[in-house]
Amino acid sequence: MRKELLIIFCFVCSAAYSQEETKIVAKTEISAIVINAQTDAPMESVHIVNLNQVKGTITNGKGQFTLTAAVNDTLYFSFLGFKSQKIRITNDMFKFKDTKVSLTELAYALEEVIVRPYQLTGYLEIDVKNLPINNSYQYSISGLSVGYEAGNKNPSAVTKVLGAILNPADLLRNLFGKKPNQMRKLRQIKEDDEIRNLLASKFDRETLMELLQVEKVDIQDILNNCNYSKSFITTANDLQILDAISGCYEDFKVLNRGKKRK
């Protein structure tokens, strides 16, 4: 009889423990505090993004925030002048209150910049030789109003230019095709106002790289192949870059579908 009671008791305890664990996992919001690692002071207006669920928020005046999350989601913390940080969500972060996340301040070291103005002599023949020469080659194609730059002179330069004009989807297929899941996130990112506000204040591409899981060079390649100017690529904020990539991706899908039908 005692053995039967002991077995029943163990079963009840096990069931209760399982229910408690389920409750912890099922929670959809996490709360924590962001502090300065050097001073332990709470940090206001820190941007937090859930990279898995594509949700964002900022900390209040006490460094506190609440965000939709689940176990194993990754939160990305960023603040101007501080090192960005990624943290994986665990059950303990739901179980215990007042979890603290520390951000470390960056130390900036300015490198020496040497400005070398052109030494003009006043003699045109000499000054022309001293000016830098653009080694990129452009090709004029009959019927088109603008020339196309193909980089350094080599046997395949013209082929690359023609390929860019006649088969634009082919050049982007490798870029977009490598990250299909990340590219599908574009619409989710654009629908979250907090993330849009965050990206509008950013110019370093770091948050965008984490959200899309792409490298900075990939972003540049996408925009270059979609005919965005170098000035736009280097000066636009991250929200403008996001919208540009999104538009480029939508055009790519249309071109790709049309090519498959043929």
Image (tube, rainbow, N blue to C red):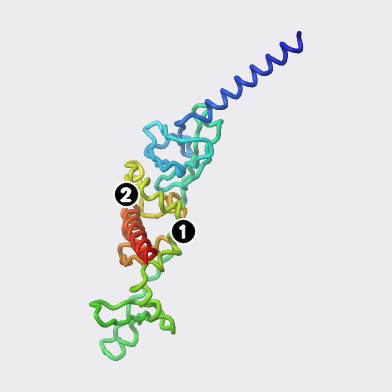
Which residue is at the far front? Answer: 262
> Where in the figure is residue 198, as x and y percent of width and height?
35, 45
Q: Which mark is residue 55?
A: none
Callout 2: 10 Å neighbours few (<14), some, many (20+)?
some
Q: Answer with left or right where residue 144 lies relative to residue 101.
A: left
Quarter of the image holding residue 191?
Answer: top left
- Residue 161 vs 239, above or below: the answer is below
Quarter of the image holding residue 176?
Answer: bottom left
Q: Secondary structure at mark 2?
A: helix
> Where in the figure is residue 94, as x and y percent of width and height?
51, 29
Q: Secondary structure at mark 1?
A: loop
Q: Residue at x 52, y 37 (%)?
A: 89
- Residue 111 vs 125, above or below: the answer is above
The amino acid pointed to by label 1 is Glu
The amino acid pointed to by label 2 is Ala
Q: Nearer the viewer, residue 170 or 235?
A: 170
* Sequence-wise first label, 1 or 2: 2
> Where in the figure is residue 95, as x and y percent of width and height?
54, 27
* Quadrant occupied by the C terminus: bottom left
Disc 1 from disc 2: Cα separation: 19 Å
Res 234 visible: no
Res 192 visible: yes
Q: Nearer the viewer, residue 136 or 146?
A: 146
Q: Which mark is residue 200?
A: 2
* Quadrant occupied by the N terminus: top right
- Residue 245 vs 100, above or below: the answer is below
> Where in the figure is residue 238, as x and y percent of width and height?
35, 53
Residue bearing the label numbered 1:
215
